Structure formats: C-alpha cells, structure tokens
Image: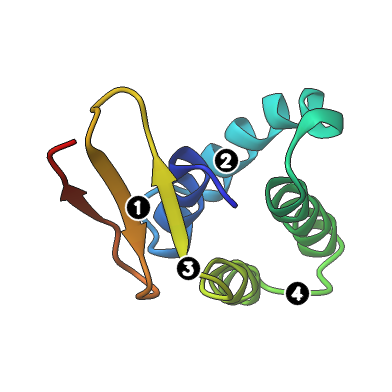
C-alpha cells in the first residue's frame, strides 16, 4: 500500500503540477528510508530512480517517465486511513482522483 503523500507527490508530477526537480527533491530523502519502506513504496521509489537514470541517459523521455509512473499508480486501488482526521479514509479506484470519504465511528 502506498501512503497518501506518495500518491499525491507522484500524481502531481504525472499531472505536471510539479516539475522533475521537485520530484527529485522529494525522492532523495525517501532513499534513506528505503530499507524500512513497505514493498509498494520501495517499488515506487525504485521506479522513480530507474526512470531518473534512464532519463539522464536519454533512454526515455520525461513523458515516458510520467506514463510509467501513472501505470504504477493505477495498477492497484489506493486506500489510506490517516490519524490526522479520524473517521476519514482516502481512497481512489480512478487513475487521477483521490477523494475523501468521511465516516462516523
């Protein structure tokens, strides 16, 4: 399972709301946490790192990196139950949406 922060950051890059430099600046601190990340999170970071290497070697274009990341994000539904807003569950089964469902516990 990916965290809401991971989904939002990568989705913002895919949708061109942030640029490549912003994505790189976000992913660098994630590398220090890599050994403790859950599988889906570590897979995402690996895809980004490989994509950045391929991009710098001109093996892929930035649009191809966006397509690759979008494909990964949409490969499974995202559910995040946060503690900042008890009773709120963030979920998405659509490629470009994250919606908040509120439940009374």
Q: Give whichever of discs 3 and 1 has the lower sequence position.
A: 1
- Where is residue 65 drawn, in percent x and y? 65, 68
- Per the rendering, the mark at residue 77 is 3
Q: CA distance from mark 4 to mark 1?
A: 20 Å
Verify CB contact (< 8 Å) between mark 4 and mark 1.
no
Between 12 and 8, the one nearer to me in the picture: 8
Which residue reaches farthest front?
105
User: Could you classify mark 1 by the number of other residues whose Cα lies within 10 Å: few (under 14), some (14-19), or many (20 or more)?
Assistant: few
Tell me which label, 3 or 4, sits earlier in the chain: 4
The residues tagged by marks 1 and 2 sit, at their Cα atoms, a distance apart of 12 Å
At numbered mark 3, what does the secondary structure look like: helix, strand or loop? Answer: loop
User: What residue sits right under mark 2 in the picture?
Assistant: 21
Q: Position of residue 6 (x, y in %)?
A: 53, 44
Nearest the eye: 45 or 49: 45
Task: From this view, report whether residue 19 is shown above or below residue 93.
Answer: above
Q: Which residue is mark 4?
A: 60
Q: Position of residue 30 (x, y in %)?
A: 70, 30
Cα distance in 3D space between marks 3 and 1: 22 Å
Q: Nearer the viewer, mark 1 or mark 2?
A: 1
Position of 44 compared to 10: left or right?
right
Query: Residue 38's spot in the image, x, y percent?
Result: 73, 42
Q: Residue at x 76, y 62 (%)?
A: 55
Q: Residue at point 76% right, 59% down?
A: 47
- Choose mark 2 or mark 3, whichever is in front: 3
Callout 2 touching callout 4 (CB < 8 Å): no
Find the distance from the CA under tag 3 to the CA under tag 4. 27 Å
Task: Residue under label 1, please give it.
Answer: 17
Asked if marks 3 and 4 touch (Cβ < 8 Å), the reply is: no
- Helix, strand or loop status at disc 1: loop
Q: Quadrant of residue 105?
A: top left
């Amino acid at each position: 399972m990916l965290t809401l922060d991971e989904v939002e950051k990568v989705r913002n890059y895919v949708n061109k709301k942030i640029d490549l430099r912003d994505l790189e600046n976000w992913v660098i601190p994630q590398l220090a946490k890599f050994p403790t990340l859950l599988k889906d999170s570590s897979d995402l970071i690996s895809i980004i790192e490989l994509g950045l290497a391929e991009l710098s070697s001109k093996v892929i274009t930035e649009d191809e990196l966006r397509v690759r990341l979008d494909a990964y994000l949409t490969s499974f539904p995202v559910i995040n139950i946060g503690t900042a807003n008890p009773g709120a569950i963030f979920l998405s089964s659509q490629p470009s949406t994250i919606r908040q469902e509120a439940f009374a516990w």
